[in-house]
């Protein structure tokens, strides 16, 4: 209780919180401002000390958009991925066969150990969100674009002609995991 969690992304050589540092191995490939963004998650204790810092180890671009915790101290991060996969330590998330703008969700325990992760075919092109409730459910939300059907778990969401916005098929979604 009283911990602060933050997620985001960086394209610089490194990002650091206290003595914890993440490197951007792809920084050397930057040209004309086309650098690879890397996602991070940091846990800071009530005294302002960095407890741990996590980041992707894959060579794909990823953006952290939302973070939430549950009553057990587990942490959930959502964001977008531009590439075939996303790797955090030993967790490998693979892009689905049908995709437009993949979204990821990954969870960590209170000590920073990876619990599980998922990648979805859409939802990662702009801000997506995550929240938890007192019953242990995790909810994510965002929009899906040009993926028909958009599959989350055992559910399939379909775009219709009513889903067209500015010439493209797009719709919102909310999904609950328990």
Image (spheres, rainbow, N blue to C red):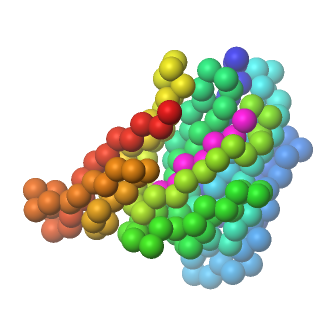
Q: Nearer the viewer, residue 2 or 172?
A: 172
Residue at position x 77%, y 57% in the image: 89
* Residue 8 magenta-highlighted: no
Counting from the top left corner in percent of width and height, residue 9 is at 61, 55
Residue 127 visible from this viewpoint: no
Count of labels in the image: 0
At 72% from the left edge and 74% from the top edge, which residue is drawn?
26
Image quadrant where residue 44 sits:
top right
Instruction: Inspect this view and state whether residue 60 appears.
Output: yes
Q: Which residues are magenta?
A: 103-109
Residue, x 70% and y 57% (percent of image)? 91
Residue at far left of view: 162
Residue 107 shown in magenta: yes
Dominant secondary structure of the residues highlighted in magenta in the image: strand
Q: Choose top left, top right, bottom left or bottom right for residue 22.
A: bottom right
Residue 136: % across, % down: 54, 25
Residue 167, above or below 103: below
């Amino acid at each position: 209780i009283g911990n602060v969690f933050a997620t985001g992304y960086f394209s610089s050589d490194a990002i650091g919180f206290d003595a914890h540092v993440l490197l951007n191995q792809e920084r050397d490939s930057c040209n004309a401002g086309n650098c690879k963004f890397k996602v991070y998650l940091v846990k800071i204790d009530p005294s302002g000390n960095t407890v741990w810092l996590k980041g992707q180890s894959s060579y794909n671009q990823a953006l952290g958009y939302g973070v939430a915790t549950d009553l057990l101290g587990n942490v959930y991060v959502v964001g977008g991925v531009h590439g075939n996969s996303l790797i955090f330590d030993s967790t490998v998330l693979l892009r689905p066969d049908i995709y437009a703008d993949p979204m990821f969700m990954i969870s960590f325990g209170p000590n920073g150990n990876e619990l599980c992760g998922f990648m979805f075919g859409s939802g990662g092109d702009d801000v997506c969100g995550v929240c938890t409730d007192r019953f242990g459910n995790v909810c994510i939300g965002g929009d899906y674009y040009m993926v028909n059907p958009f599959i989350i778990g055992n559910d399939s969401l379909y775009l219709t002609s009513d889903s067209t916005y500015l010439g493209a098929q797009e719709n919102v979604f909310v999904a609950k995991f328990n």
